[in-house]
């Protein structure tokens, strides 16, 4: 059974930073990609950033230059360093694990940017 667990969310002031972590465990032999998505209240879940097995990255335009995604293959962990946080970055951040056969979602971690 595969599990995906996020951590690192919290409350931060505008301009602040947070680092999210997501660790996958279970019967995992090959990872195609890992990524972060977020869902603001009343809105759909949108892509924030992804990173593939060969470290190719993709970012939403709204976070380019502020967020950085990275991974530790040995730990099956992906990180999202978020700097220069804005009010509109508020939402639940979900980790997505892409395996050859299917994708898995974590339960999400809340990020609130507020003064």
Image (cartoon, rainbow, N blue to C red):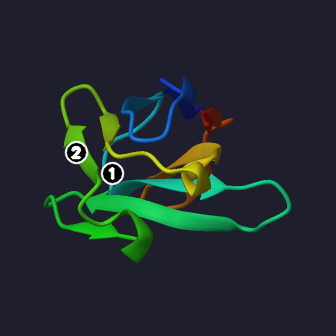
Label annotation for residue 103: none
Residue with the mark numbered 1: 31
Mark 2–mark 1 Cα distance, whole angstroms, equals: 14 Å
Q: Relative to 58, is 81 above or below?
A: above
Q: Residue furthest front?
A: 115
SS at badge 2: strand
Q: Nearer the viewer, mark 2 or mark 1?
A: 2
Q: Residue furthest right?
A: 42
Q: Quadrant of residue 1?
A: top right
SS at badge 1: loop
Q: Residue furthest left?
A: 54
Judge by depth and name the residue closer to the eye, 56 or 109. 109
Give the x, y percent position of residue 12.
52, 28
Packing grade of label 2 (10 A; few <14, some 14-19, many >=20) is: many
Label annotation for residue 70: 2
- What residue do we see at 55% from left, 52% from top? 89
Give the x, y percent position of residue 81.
30, 39
Q: Relative to 113, is 69 above or below?
A: below
- Which quadrant of the rendered structure holds the C terminus? top right
- What residue do we see at 34% from left, 46% from top? 84
Packing grade of label 1 (10 A; few <14, some 14-19, many >=20) is: some
Give the x, y percent position of residue 29.
32, 42
Is residue 100 something that shows in the picture?
no
Give the x, y percent position of residue 32.
33, 60
- What residue do we see at 27% from left, 49% from top? 69
Is residue 65 something that shows in the picture?
yes
């Amino acid at each position: 059974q595969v599990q995906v667990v996020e951590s690192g969310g919290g409350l931060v002031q505008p301009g602040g930073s947070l680092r999210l972590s997501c660790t996958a465990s279970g019967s995992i032999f090959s990872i195609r990609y890992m990524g972060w998505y977020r869902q603001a209240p009343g809105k759909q879940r949108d892509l924030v950033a992804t990173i593939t097995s060969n470290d190719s990255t993709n970012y939403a335009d709204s976070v380019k230059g502020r967020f950085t995604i990275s991974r530790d293959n040995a730990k099956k962990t992906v990180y999202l360093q978020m700097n220069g946080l804005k009010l509109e970055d508020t939402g639940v951040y979900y980790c997505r694990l892409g395996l050859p056969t299917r994708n898995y979602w974590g339960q999400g971690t809340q990020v609130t940017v507020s003064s």
